[in-house]
């Protein structure tokens, strides 16, 4: 089953921003968001910002789409937080960073949409690559207001467990810094 389409109607914060940009349907919103370049925005919990700033991350892009469905009482679309073993094969562009720190992968928190047991990823313009899916280790449903602090804390707790379990020679701060370098690389290559 595919995600349902609907007409965007005025009267809600995020919907109004899309309408002002001439985006009339949910499918048009998906296409518009998918075309946006990857990049962080100033206020991740102000979901209309991805349209006004012209960029977004996996969290802000998918939370914005989820907000649109919520504003229209369209139920069934879920915001999913997955933890996967990110490597250069499933996430091209980060190989040099992993090699530099002698890591086979980085545990990454990735936010996607799910509908009727199917996952949808609109993070990077021009690609529907979901090769990361084979490397998913954990998955949980989250609310749109959990894409910032909750996601970071959850991600860091997973990283702490990984450091202990695999006896990595890095502290949490060091691993987080390496992860941030990977994300910076992704912003420059713009693919996933």
Image: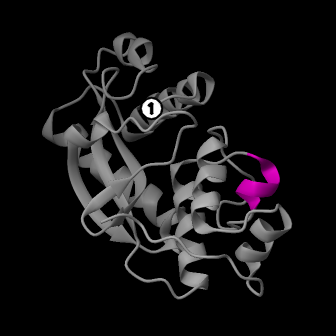
Q: What percent of the width, then of the height, locates residue 76? A: 37, 78
Give the tally of numbered discs.
1
Q: What percent of the width, then of the height, locates residue 86? A: 32, 33
Q: What percent of the width, then of the height, locates residue 114? A: 35, 63
Query: Image height check: is 99 above or below 132?
Result: above
Query: Image height check: is 178 above or below 65?
Result: above
- Residue 3 appears in which quarter of the rendering? bottom left
Q: Quadrant of the C terminus?
A: top left
User: Please, which colouring scheme is shown?
Assistant: one colour
Q: Tell me the chief SS of the magenta region.
A: helix
Seen at 40% across and 11% down, the residue is 100
Seen at 19% across and 41% down, the residue is 164
State the extent of the magenta-drawn residues as a range. 49-54
Query: Image height check: is 23 above or below 77?
Result: above
Foreground of the two, 156 or 81? 81
Which residue is labeled 1 in the image?
Answer: 192
Query: Image height check: is 48 above or below 157?
Result: below
Foreground of the two, 16 or 91? 16
Seen at 80% across and 50% down, the residue is 53
Q: Is residue 126 on the magenta stretch?
A: no
Q: Quadrant of the N terminus?
A: bottom left
Check the image and name the residue furthest to the left: 165
Q: What percent of the width, then of the height, locates residue 24? A: 71, 68
Q: Is residue 52 on the magenta stretch?
A: yes
């Amino acid at each position: 089953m595919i995600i349902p389409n609907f007409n965007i109607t005025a009267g809600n914060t995020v919907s109004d921003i899309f309408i002002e940009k001439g985006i009339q349907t949910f499918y048009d919103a998906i296409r518009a968001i998918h075309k946006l370049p990857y990049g962080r925005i100033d206020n991740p919990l102000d979901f209309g910002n991805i349209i006004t700033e012209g960029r977004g991350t996996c969290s802000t892009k998918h939370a914005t789409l989820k907000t649109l469905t919520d504003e229209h009482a369209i139920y069934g679309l879920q915001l999913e937080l997955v933890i996967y073993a990110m490597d250069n094969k499933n996430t091209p562009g980060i190989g040099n960073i992993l090699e530099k720190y002698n890591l086979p992968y980085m545990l990454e928190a990735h936010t996607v949409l799910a509908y009727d047991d199917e996952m949808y990823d609109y993070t990077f313009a021009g690609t529907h690559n979901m090769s990361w899916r084979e490397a998913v280790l954990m998955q949980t449903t989250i609310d749109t207001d959990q894409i910032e602090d909750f996601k970071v804390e959850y991600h860091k707790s997973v990283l702490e467990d990984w450091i202990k379990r695999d006896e990595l020679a890095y502290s949490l701060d060091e691993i987080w810094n390496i992860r941030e370098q990977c994300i910076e690389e992704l912003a420059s290559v713009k693919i996933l």
